[in-house]
Image: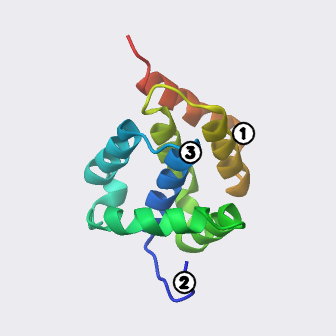
Amino acid sequence: MPETTILSPQDALVALMLAVSAADGTVRTAELVQISNLVENLPAFADYDGARLQEMGPLVMGIMDREDGLDRLFEMVRRYLPERLWETAYAFACDVAAADGRITGPEAEMLDAIREELSLDRLHAAAIERGARARYQRV
């Protein structure tokens, strides 16, 4: 990320969701659809230009390709996302991870890293995770 790049809080939310989607090495269609749905429908993105999704993908992938990519991602999220939205970010990340019906090892590890980096209470995080599992349960 160039030092002059200024991101919105919504960009930071999108970046985290994209990183979770890419954590297992494959960005699945269901996960991209979920990100798009969240951006189109949730109040956190009410004034967000959905076209930014196209710009955020290459930015996030460029960050994650770096040796210190995960550290840079978390630095960016902490810098641009207000602390009051950290649980929201985790909830969105869980929704993206659960969207394809499975949370693989790398996705679970990424969720653990997010929880740790954002200093989320374990009980709160478990409740958020359980909610995501319930929403994406298949019949």
At 48% across and 32% down in the image, what residue appears? 98
> Depth-wise, is mark 2 or mark 3 nearer the camera?
3
Residue 71 percent location from the top left of the image: 70, 65
In front of the other: 87 or 63 = 63
- Alpha-carbon neighbours of circle 2 within 10 Å: few (<14), some, or many (≥20)? few
The location of residue 14, given as percent across then percent down, is 44, 58
Q: Residue furthest bottom?
A: 4
- Residue drawn 43% across the image and 73% down it: 8
Q: Quadrant of the N terminus?
A: bottom right
Which quadrant is the C terminus positioned in?
top left
- Where is 1 relative to 56, above or below? below
Helix, strand or loop status at disc 3: loop
What distance separates the C-alpha of mark 3 from that of mark 1?
Answer: 26 Å
- Residue that mark 2 sits on: 2
Indicate which disc residue 25 carries.
3
Left or right: 67 in relation to 9: right
Marks 2 and 3 close (CB-CB < 8 Å)? no
Q: Amino acid at mark 2?
A: Pro
Q: Are marks 3 and 1 in contact (CB under 8 Å)?
A: no
Q: Looking at numbered disc 3 in the image, what kind of residue is underneath it?
A: Gly
Q: Earlier in the sequence, mark 3 or mark 1?
A: 3
For residue 101, above or below residue 39: above
Secondary structure at badge 1 equals: helix
Can you give x and y, in whole percent of width and height, for residue 86 in the image?
57, 56
- Secondary element at image label 2: loop
Residue at image location 52% in from the left, 26% down from the top: 102
Q: Which residue is mark 1?
A: 122
Ranked by sequence position, the earlier of labels 1 and 2 is: 2
On the image, which quarter does residue 125 sit in? top right
